[in-house]
């Protein structure tokens, strides 16, 4: 493998493509609700999706850079390979990439102003700050047990509610419930990540909820969050008897993944983290179909 190919591979790994379904899922569910309420609009939907992807990549880059700077990462870690920690990407290059991607996300976000007005600017600034605050600042959210809350808000409530609002101009209780469901599924991806890294996080002084409550509690929470997501989207799949296929498929996939996580450890959990994100995207797509057909 030549150096250019190796560098490209390292940057792709730093984007953590296996986690990107988490950001796409919110926009997908919001578009389904918007279509159901006869408000779907292609341009804001696409811009919201691109913005969400760029914001997550920013967060992933920032996580790699700041975890390296504060010593949270070490070589040979159980999790996905970190290019900066392993010496494949310079810290300076990762910092530049973090803020360049954030700038690109802000440019895309500005394209939404015609649909939501200038009041979107403070919202965009908050999202930009928190895409960094997860790993950066004097009190990184990922190190003080607030990472799960951040994911619930910024991968659930914010993308679903705002993507829907920008298309329809309003907000409903059904959409809010759906946003919480998406957020809980997103939290499960983080739960797997922190479940895998519990020992490393503890030794690095990183206080995740798994470090605080332990792996057994984390697994109970993981299972319940998935079932809660199904319950919160009841209004969608209860519209017709055949829509029950959607929650059944997700429940089977979710339970199967949960069982495997319980009986897996170390780097083998990486694939199950990806599976959790895929399950989330699959359910989001199923909900999209159900809402469009209802």
Image (cartoon, grey):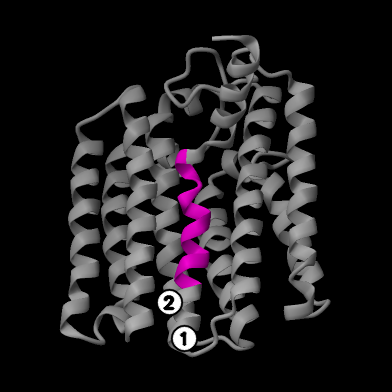
Q: Residue furthest right?
A: 118
Closer to the camera in the image, 41 or 33:
41
Image position of 233 with respect to 39: above or below: above
- In the current view of this chain or complex, which residue is farthest to the top? 2
Q: Is residue 85 among the parts visible in the rendering?
A: no
Residue drawn at x 33%, y 62% is 283
Nearer to us in this view, 119 or 41: 41
What's the magenta bit mostly, secondary-structure-wise?
helix
Dot 1 and dot 2 residues touching (CB under 8 Å)? yes
The residue pinned by badge 2 equals 177
Quadrant containing the N terminus in the rendered view: top right
Q: Residue at x 66, y 58 (%)?
A: 51
Residue positioned 81% across, 68% down in the render: 121
**Residue toward you, 52 or 119:** 52
Indicate yes or no whether the magenta region holds residue 22.
Answer: yes
Find disc 1 in the rendering and name its residue. Answer: 173
Image vertical order of residue 12 relative to residue 283, above or below: above
Please tell me whether mark 2 sits on a helix, a strand or a loop. Answer: helix
Whole-percent x and y of residue 131?
67, 49
Q: Residues within 10 Å of mark 1 (few under 14, many from 20)?
A: few
User: Which quarter of the picture shows residue 282?
Assistant: bottom left
- Residue 156 at what x, y percent from top left? 51, 64
User: Looking at the image, how many numbered discs can be counted on the residues?
Assistant: 2
Instruction: Decide which of 285, 172 is in the foreground and name it.
Output: 285
Q: Which secondary structure lies at badge 1?
A: helix
23 part of magenta stretch: yes
C-alpha separation, residue under disc 1 versus residue under disc 2: 6 Å
Point out the stretch of residues depicted in magenta: 18-30
Dot 2, crowdedness within 10 Å: few (<14), some or many (≥20)?
Answer: many
Query: What's the residue at 63%, 30% (across, down)?
Result: 64
């Amino acid at each position: 493998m030549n150096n250019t190919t190796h560098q490209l591979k390292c940057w792709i790994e730093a984007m953590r493509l296996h986690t990107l379904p988490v950001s796409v899922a919110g926009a997908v569910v919001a578009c389904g609700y918007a279509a159901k309420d006869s408000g779907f609009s292609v341009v804001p939907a696409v811009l919201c999706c691109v913005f969400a992807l760029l914001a997550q990549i920013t967060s992933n880059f920032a996580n790699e850079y700041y975890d390296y700077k504060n010593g949270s990462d070490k070589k040979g870690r159980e999790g996905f390979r970190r290019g900066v920690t392993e010496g494949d990407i310079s810290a300076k290059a990762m910092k530049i990439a973090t803020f360049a991607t954030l700038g690109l996300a802000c440019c895309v976000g500005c394209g939404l102003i015609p649909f939501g007005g200038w009041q979107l600017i403070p919202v965009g600034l908050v999202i930009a700050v928190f895409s960094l605050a997860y790993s950066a600042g004097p009190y990184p959210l990922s190190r003080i047990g607030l990472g799960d809350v951040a994911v619930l808000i910024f991968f659930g409530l914010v993308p679903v509610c705002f993507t829907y609002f920008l298309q329809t101009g309003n907000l409903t209780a059904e959409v809010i419930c759906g946003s919480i469901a998406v957020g809980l599924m997103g939290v499960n991806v983080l739960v797997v990540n922190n479940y895998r890294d519990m020992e490393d996080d503890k030794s690095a002084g990183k206080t995740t909820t798994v470090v605080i409550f332990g792996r057994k509690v984390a697994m109970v929470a993981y299972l319940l969050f998935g079932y809660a997501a199904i319950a919160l989207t009841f209004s969608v799949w209860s519209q017709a008897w055949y829509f029950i296929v959607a929650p059944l498929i997700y429940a089977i996939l979710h339970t199967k993944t949960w069982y495997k996580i319980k009986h897996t450890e170390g780097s083998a959990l990486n694939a199950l983290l990806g599976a959790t994100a895929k399950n989330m995207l699959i359910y989001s797509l199923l909900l999209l179909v159900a809402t469009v057909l209802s």
